[in-house]
Image (spheres, rainbow, N blue to C red):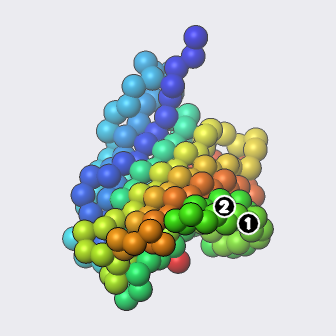
């Protein structure tokens, strides 16, 4: 049988960004390994930054020696609003090369839409400065086969954002996104939207 080989970014503290605070650490298993996870890097920002960026955490490119990539980020915006939308970009590409389908559950309602030719993959909704104190949002991303160079990259995002203590401000989202590029992913950025 095969092994579950993957690279993972998970919470490890707080990473403050201009509009997003994120908690990230990196964990990975090597391709051909036993399928377990092992730490490959960890970082906590002490001041606001424009974006979470794997180049900063790793001091360079994401190694291409793994099979799958996961990102787990605990986020809170520092902007004046109640919430903010984190975004996902690969290899410093801010062109309109991303498409995504999102399905958001808000209180008792639901909305979904497909968006093409964007400069990011939507990462959901997370609390910001005007949200209830102590609230943060979760953004969980899976990127299978991130180092292969045959197909465009696909990302699956799950999000929970509870930014106030009323039913209308509870959000859970599922987002499927595509980066229109077959290059291996060597860098991931999570800027605020």
Task: Single out the residue that lies furthest toward the top.
Answer: 1
Point out the image quarter for the N terminus.
top right
Q: Is residue 89 visible?
A: no
The span from disc 2 to disc 1 (Cα, nearest Å) is: 6 Å
Between 111 and 69, which is closer to the camera in this rendering?
111
Residue at 40% across, 72% down: 166
Task: Single out the residue that lies furthest toward the left.
Answer: 46
In-image side of 5 versus 183 (left or right): left
* Whole-percent x, y for residue 52 in the image: 41, 66
Residue highlighted by disc 1:
113
Label drawn at residue 54: none
Label count reads 2
Q: Is residue 42 visible?
A: yes
Residue at 62% across, 56% down: 175
Between 156 and 82, which is closer to the camera in this rendering?
82
Task: Single out the residue that lies furthest toward the bottom.
Answer: 80
In-image side of 177 versus 31 (left or right): right
Residue highlighted by disc 2:
102
* Whole-percent x, y for residue 81 in the image: 41, 86
Residue at 26% across, 63% down: 14
Q: What element does badge 2 sit on?
A: strand
* Whole-percent x, y for residue 64 in the image: 53, 41
Residues tagged 2 and 1 counted as in contact (Cβ below 8 A):
yes
Q: Callout 1 environment at 10 Å: few (<14), some (14 to 19), or many (20+)?
A: few
Residue at 40% across, 66% down: 162
Q: Is residue 193 above or below residue 90?
A: below
Q: What element does badge 1 sit on?
A: strand
In-image side of 154 versus 185 (left or right): right
Q: Callout 2 environment at 10 Å: few (<14), some (14 to 19), or many (20+)?
A: many
Q: Earlier in the sequence, mark 2 or mark 1?
A: 2
Between 124 and 50, which is closer to the camera in this rendering?
124
Q: Quadrant of the rendered structure where residue 37 is? A: top left
């Amino acid at each position: 049988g095969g092994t579950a080989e993957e690279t993972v970014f998970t919470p490890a503290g707080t990473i403050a960004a201009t509009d997003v605070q994120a908690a990230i650490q990196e964990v990975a298993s090597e391709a051909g390994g036993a399928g377990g996870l092992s730490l490959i890097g960890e970082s906590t920002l002490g001041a606001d930054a424009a974006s979470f960026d794997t180049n900063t955490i790793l001091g360079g490119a994401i190694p291409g020696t793994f099979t799958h990539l996961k990102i787990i980020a605990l986020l809170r915006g520092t902007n004046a609003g109640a919430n903010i939308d984190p975004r996902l970009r690969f290899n410093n590409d801010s062109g309109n090369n991303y498409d995504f389908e999102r399905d958001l559950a808000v209180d008792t309602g639901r909305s979904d839409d497909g968006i093409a030719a964007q400069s990011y993959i939507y990462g959901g909704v997370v609390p910001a400065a005007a949200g209830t104190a102590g609230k943060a949002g979760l953004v969980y991303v899976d990127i299978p086969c991130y180092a292969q160079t045959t197909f465009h990259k696909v990302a699956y995002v799950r999000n929970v954002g509870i930014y106030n203590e009323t039913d209308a401000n509870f959000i859970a989202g599922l987002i499927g996104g595509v980066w229109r590029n077959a290059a291996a992913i060597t860098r991931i950025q999570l800027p605020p939207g």
